[in-house]
Amino acid sequence: MINIDVFVRKGRVEDAPAAAQLIVQAMEDTARRLVCTDDMSQVIKAFEYLYRQKNNLYSFQNIVVLECEGEVAGIITTYDGGRLKELKKLAFDYFAEFGFDGNMQDETQPGELYIDTLSVSAKHQGKGYGQLLINHILKEAPHVGFSKVGLLVDVENPRAKKLYERLGFQTVGKKMLFEDHFEHMQYEVS
């Protein structure tokens, strides 16, 4: 059951500390690889910086926040797949300062509203908040000009895949990011 003090809103610059932690939580090893360190405080600090900046993959401009009782309980990061190279360049130029070589397969494609990260804080998991955030994006997609919503799901996360399938996503391909295997799933907006 969803609490009445829960609402979805656009990300704000001041959400950076909580949002960065949730982005890193969603990305797991990929975040460490991008920042080239296992020091989680440095990884989170790097994503806080990117979150506060405009026009990059992890900008507050691309984040929808689920707020619960005054705190950031979850986030979903989405962007136009057609802008991937532009948004990636700004983020990857920053990651290059940490030693990242920029070598990573494209996750999305033009014509797709891409869900990059979805994360709910441990305190708020199991309450349906992740599904609420996804449903919000699925409802908004046609209003911002998209007939497809895409995401990647780790092949080692069958629970997440089942959730996406239940919501209407279908596997359309396979991707590899670093050494990790993913399924590319899409939802056709009717």
Image (tube, rainbow, N blue to C red):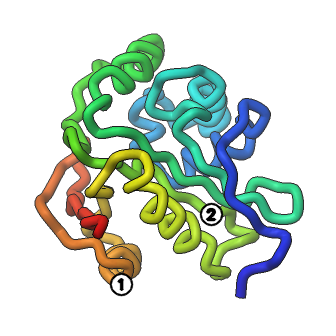
Image quadrant in which you'd find residue 103: top left
The residue nearer to you, when weighing 143 against 176, is 143
Residue, disc 1 = 166
**Point 27% across, 56% down: residue:** 147
Mark nearer the N terminus (2 vs 1): 2
Q: Secondary structure at mark 2?
A: strand
**Residue 128, position in %: x, y?**
61, 79
- In-image side of 117 versus 70 (left or right): left
How would you rate the neighbour count of disc 1 (Cα within 10 Å): few for under 14, some for 14-19, many for 20 or more? few
Q: Inspect the image, locate mark 2, and give the three-letter code of the amino acid beneath it.
A: Val
Of the numbered discs in the image, which one, if any, rests on residue 1? none
Q: Who is closer to the viewer here, 104 or 140?
A: 140
Q: Secondary structure at mark 1?
A: helix
**What residue would you read off at disc 2?**
120
Q: Residues within 10 Å of mark 2 (few under 14, many from 20)?
A: many
Residue depth check, mark 2 versus mark 1: number of the one nearer the observer: 1
| Dot 1 amino acid type | Arg
For the point 47% across and 51% down, the residue is: 117
Q: Is residue 187 visible?
A: yes
Q: Where does the image place residue 42, in percent across and percent down from the top left?
A: 62, 29
Seen as rendered, the residue at the extreme right is 70
Residue at the image position 22 percent from the left and 44 percent from the top: 111
The C terminus: image quadrant: bottom left
Residue 142 is left or right of residue 31, and the answer is left
The image quadrant of residue 107 is top left
